Image (cartoon, rainbow, N blue to C red):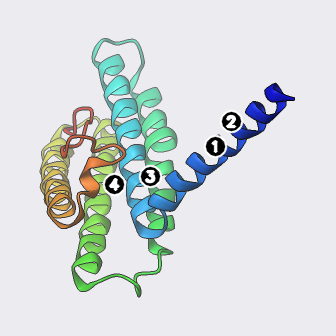
Amino acid sequence: MVLATIGIFLILLAAYVRWRNQERLTGPLAEVNQIFLLEQELLATYDQAKTALAEEKIDAETFVNIIKTEVLAPWREAQSRLRKVDFNRLTEKGKRLFESLQRMMKLREQAWGLVVDSIREGSGEGMESAAQKAAEADRLEDEIFAEMKAESGAANEGPMSNGTPRRASRRP
């Protein structure tokens, strides 16, 4: 009987903790957190593919396919989800942050796309443009993190545990 009571208590406690964690990150903030977590994963995938290409472990066609299917496709899905977020409940500053996030995501997509085009065409011309787009995306992202930290301390949750993002290399 005591064991059953303890078991039920632990199950209820676990359910409560899970509920509270979901309660804390809901709506727009939850989506932002998910986007930055996804970005970390995609940057790591990109870096692994770039390293494998440089070490000639994969060919250019395989690299392009990895970027198109494992990086760009999920990134575009995240952009689509972000466009569905209800901005009406946000403050003006919150709306500006979301607009910056959307611009950052578009720039990151363009940078990866330029890398794919450059590799596919066999020219390095697009790589400089890709680096410029990535640098602009990085600048916007840094502004977003700084603003989030200043406003609510939200930069101390999720992928931004100490106020700065933990991420793989952001350069093409």
Which of label 2 and label 3 is nearer to you?
A: 2
Distance between mark 4 and mark 2 Cα atoms: 44 Å
Residue 134 is at least partly visible in this image = yes
Distance between mark 3 and mark 4 Cα atoms: 17 Å
Identify residue for label 3.
Answer: 34
* Amino acid at pointer 2: Leu
Among numbered discs 1 and 3, the one appearing first in the sequence: 1
From the top left corner, tell me how far across and down residue 98 is, in percent.
31, 71
Q: Are marks 4 and 2 in contact (CB under 8 Å)?
A: no
**Relative to 80, is 150 on the left or the right?**
left
* Amino acid at pointer 4: Glu
Quadrant into which the C terminus falls: top left
Compared to 17, does 87 lie above or below?
A: below
Q: Residue 116 has which mark? A: none
How packed mark 1 is, by other alpha carbons closer than 10 Å (few <14, some 14-19, many 20 or more), is few
From the top left corner, tell me how far across and down residue 156 is, in percent.
26, 48
Q: Nearer the viewer, residue 1 or 115?
A: 1
From the top left corner, tell me how far across and down residue 109 is, in percent.
34, 54
Identify residue for label 4.
Answer: 109
Residue 25 is at least partly visible in this image = no
User: Where on the picture, by quarter, is residue 140?
Assistant: bottom left
Identify residue for label 1.
Answer: 13
Distance between mark 1 and mark 4 Cα atoms: 42 Å
Q: Residue 10 has which mark? A: 2
Which of label 4 and label 2 is nearer to you?
A: 2
Q: Are marks 2 and 1 in contact (CB under 8 Å)?
A: yes
Q: Secondary structure at mark 4?
A: helix
**Relative to 124, is 161 on the left or the right?**
right
* Amino acid at pointer 3: Gln
